[in-house]
Image: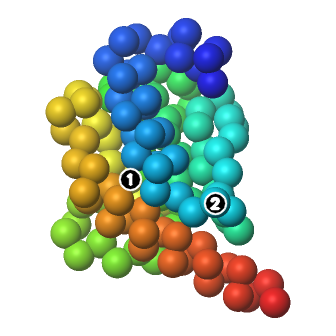
């Protein structure tokens, strides 16, 4: 994680740090964080979400930090907080400043994502 932070400009580093804290504080104990493709990736039974700064290559964004939900297409996003891009499954939000981060909306979506993730454990049994 330290290696990632060292490569990011300050504004992206702050956004990544704030998003990680919100995610880590709201994921249940069975969920884990790992660095995949050089970015924080959070998973339980399957992928839950990813935080991808624009500085890291292959993220597909030119500026800001992307918070992507792996199964965004299955989330109940009543507030239409997430962007539905060209990917049919991953829905996301791009933050260009820490002030844009709406922790209430993120927590609500994380709870939805956890419900979806728990369905994957039921299907395994």
The residue located at (63%, 24%) in the rendering is 1
**Front-lying residue, 88 or 77:** 77
The residue under label 1 is 92
Residue 66 placement (x, y as % from top left): 40, 40
Q: 21 above or below 68?
A: above
The residue under label 2 is 29
Disc 2 versus disc 1: nearer the observer? 2
Residue 12, picture quadrant: top left
The residue located at (55%, 9%) in the rendering is 6
The residue located at (54%, 11%) in the rendering is 7
Residue 45, picture quadrant: bottom right
SS at circle 2 = loop
Whether residue 99 appears in this view of the structure is: yes
Labelled disc at residue 38: none
Q: Is residue 4 left or right of residue 81?
A: right
Q: What coloring was used for the rendering?
A: rainbow
SS at circle 1 = strand
Q: Is residue 46 left or right of residue 102?
A: right
The residue located at (64%, 60%) in the rendering is 29
Q: Is residue 74 left or right of residue 62?
A: right
* Disc 2/disc 1 C-alpha distance (Å): 24 Å
Residue 2 placement (x, y as % from top left): 62, 17
Q: 12 above or below 60?
A: above
Residue 11 placement (x, y as % from top left): 32, 18
Q: Residues within 10 Å of mark 2 (few under 14, many from 20)?
A: few
Looking at the rendered structure, the number of numbered marks drawn on it comes to 2
Tell whether label 1 touches label 2 (CB within 8 Å): no
Q: Earlier in the sequence, mark 2 or mark 1?
A: 2
> Residue reaching furthest right?
125
Residue 23 placement (x, y as % from top left): 46, 49
């Amino acid at each position: 994680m330290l290696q990632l932070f060292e490569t990011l400009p300050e504004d992206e580093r702050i956004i990544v740090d704030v998003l990680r804290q919100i995610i880590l504080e709201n994921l249940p104990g069975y969920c884990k964080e790992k660095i995949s493709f050089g970015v924080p990736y959070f998973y339980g039974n399957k992928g839950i979400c990813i935080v991808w700064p624009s500085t890291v290559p292959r993220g597909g964004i030119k500026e800001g930090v992307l918070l992507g939900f792996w199964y965004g297409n299955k989330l109940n996003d009543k507030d239409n907080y997430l962007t539905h891009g060209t990917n049919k499954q991953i829905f996301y939000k791009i933050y260009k400043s820490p002030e844009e981060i709406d922790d209430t909306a993120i927590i609500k979506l994380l709870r939805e994502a956890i419900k979806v993730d728990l369905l994957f454990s039921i299907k395994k049994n």
